[in-house]
Amino acid sequence: MEAFTRVEGVVTPLNRADIDTDQIIPKQFLKRVERTGFGEFLFWDWRGEEGFPLDRAEYAGSTILVAGRNFGCGSSREHAPWALEDFGFRAIIAPSFADIFFTNCTKIGLLPVELPEDEVHALLHAATGEPGSRVEVDLEAQVVRTPDGREIPFPIDPVVRERMLHGWDDIALTLAHEDDIATYERDREREGPATTPFA
Amino acid sequence: MGRTLFQRVWDDHEVRAADSGGAAILYVDLHLVHEVTSPQAFDGLRLAGRRVRRPDRTLATVDHNVPTIGREAGVTDPLSAAQIAALERNCAEFGIPLFSLRSNRQGIVHVIGPELGVTQPGMTIVCGDSHTSTHGAFGALAFGIGTSEVEHVLATQTLTQGPPRTMRINIEGRTGLGVGAKDIILGTIGQIGVAGARGHVIEYAGSAIRALSMEGRMTVCNMSIEGGGRAGMIAPDDTTFAWLEGRPAAPVDFAAAVDRWRELPSDWDAVFDREVHVDAASFAPQVTWGTNPGMVAPVDGRVPTPDDYDDPTDREGVVRALEYMGLRGGEAIEDIALDAVFIGSCTNARLEDLRAAAAVIRGRRVAATVRAMVVPGSMQVKAAAEAEGLDDVFRAAGFEWRDAGCSMCLAMNDDFLQPEERCASTSNRNFEGRQGKGGRTHLVSPPMAAAAAIAGHLVDVRTFDTEMEAVS
């Protein structure tokens, strides 16, 4: 995956809570067997609603999405982060994220940033009131920088941070411990699922 | 200090502990695969020249995208056909057992795992599907993953994981007649909210959980994700062992396995990060009125209004949900008329669910204004139901009797609602557009869905019988 160090760009405000992955990418687009090309279907059912931010020219080219709490709840479909990334977003800021969605983002180099609810509301307010307002998300320093020069720190698992900063391949990292896996299998193998005879 | 069920399973699967520098590496005992979230993972393996480490610990089926009618003619939608063909090719190439469309073992991935007996206490089970939590009903640690992690498990048979927090939900009391597992979990989500268990693995405990059948426990654990939980687990007991005994993949030395499994439950002095208490005896049958599973009310209640909420974000959410659902707020739940009824999904399409629905329907007719459908969870469930004559009960009442799959739970195939159509559904999500763009979903239990199909509107299954007698 692509390394993530710092992203500066226009903020798109999406002031709704509990946005589920069915909204981010509806099921009719999950039939594709490719990993790319989902961006044009992002928020498909909400596009065209009056004033929907992703339709507005002021937010064109935006790289940072700011949304309400529990973003990405529901289905585990990684197509949701793929669609957000393919559309052009590099970071999502919200008060909280659903667990599976959060992990899925970190696996593809899309940075989920958890900020306190009042800070998120301030960003939503600024981006709505002054469309085109920008922020910088700095993973190395673990801060979000606002136009008025404030630095808002955010938490992230140090292992995840390191992996995203370097764009490391998760599978290769694990396979470096292949001996440990083989040892585990040898020492602790339990009866496995016997599936083939019933086909 | 004692250990929890979760901690035992976790400890038993640590290939490398989290404090060894880097993330914990957790071994995966069983990896379930389906057609929608796997093709890109297999492509990734090929690109990197990697193999599937343990095809013998991997099991695949087709469920999300399959037709539930007219299978003899093949899959007519070209995109669906291509996705199913891709899984068949990938499983053949990597040596993974597959129950495809023509297998009598095909079915929803979370129905066939337990049915085969490959789901067992103390295991770690993952799948590229958020309802993998279903398997936690057996005392397994089971959770959904994305496609990158699917690829990771295929290549390494492990996952890198940060340890989650633990939460025990103690559900005590006897449920009343007509109130079951679905009502317990919907009521619980209503209490804790859709993000209530975020970051936590749930253990469901208490007398109401112990009293449930395995089917009921699967219904409860299935919807853990709708409360934001990473996984949901229930301590294995004699109910669990009796259900597993004699299943095709049950351990050969079953008695020895049971002895091991009896060691799993949480110790009396185990400490959880959070404890929640739920009173099952207080629950009426539950009905969702909004666009997430936490927007739920008792069937004898009313749809709320935005003024019932203090938090401004909640209020805005309710305004939007009511508008989408075509409700004003304040109407009696039982006055809501329906266009469709769906009995199916990994939440409620096992044999016990179909029996419970059939018991309500027997000898009655679906309302003229309603189209009703039963989609068994697996072809084995379908065959078992037919052996008992349940298909005749459903057909005679005017239900369509279909082949197994996810069907109208997520409406990826041809089974979907038209805009503004209103459906009582035994599935797990009432999100906007979930059952079809513009479709309106009310989540209910199988008996509640059955009663609603007959009545033509949402109705309290507890008083439904007497009402029907008064009419006839």
Image (cartoon, rainbow, N blue to C red):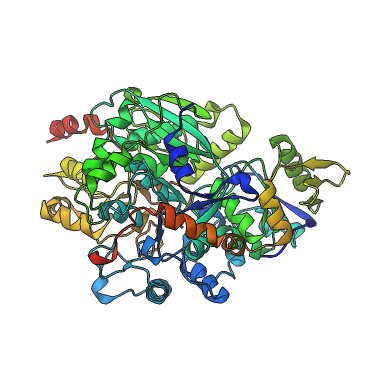
Would residue B136 appear left or right of B72 to someone viewing this image? right
**Count of marks placed on residues:** 0
On screen, residue B318 above or below A172:
above
Would residue B312 appear left or right of B285 to someone viewing this image? right
Where residue B53 appears, as percent x and y from the top left, is 46, 66
Residue appearing at x 75%, y 46% in the figure: A128
The C terminus of chain B lies in which quarter of the figure? top left
Instruction: Inspect this view and state whether residue B254 appears.
Output: yes
Where residue B422 appears, as percent x and y from the top left, is 37, 48
Where residue A36 appears, as percent x and y from the top left, is 59, 70
On screen, residue B125 above or below B334:
below
Residue appearing at x 50%, y 29% in the figure: B272
Would residue B407 appear left or right of B388 to someone viewing this image? right
Q: Nearer the viewer, residue B356 or B264?
A: B264
Residue appearing at x 27%, y 52% in the figure: B117
Q: In which quarter of the image is residue B204?
A: top left
Residue appearing at x 58%, y 42% in the figure: A70
Q: In which quarter of the image is residue B403?
A: bottom left
Where residue A168 appears, as percent x and y from the top left, is 67, 62
Q: Nearer the viewer, residue B147 or B13?
A: B13
Instruction: Inspect this view and state whether residue B376 appears.
Output: no
Would residue B55 appear left or right of A135 to someone viewing this image? left
On screen, residue A65 above or below A120:
below
On screen, residue B204 above or below B77:
above
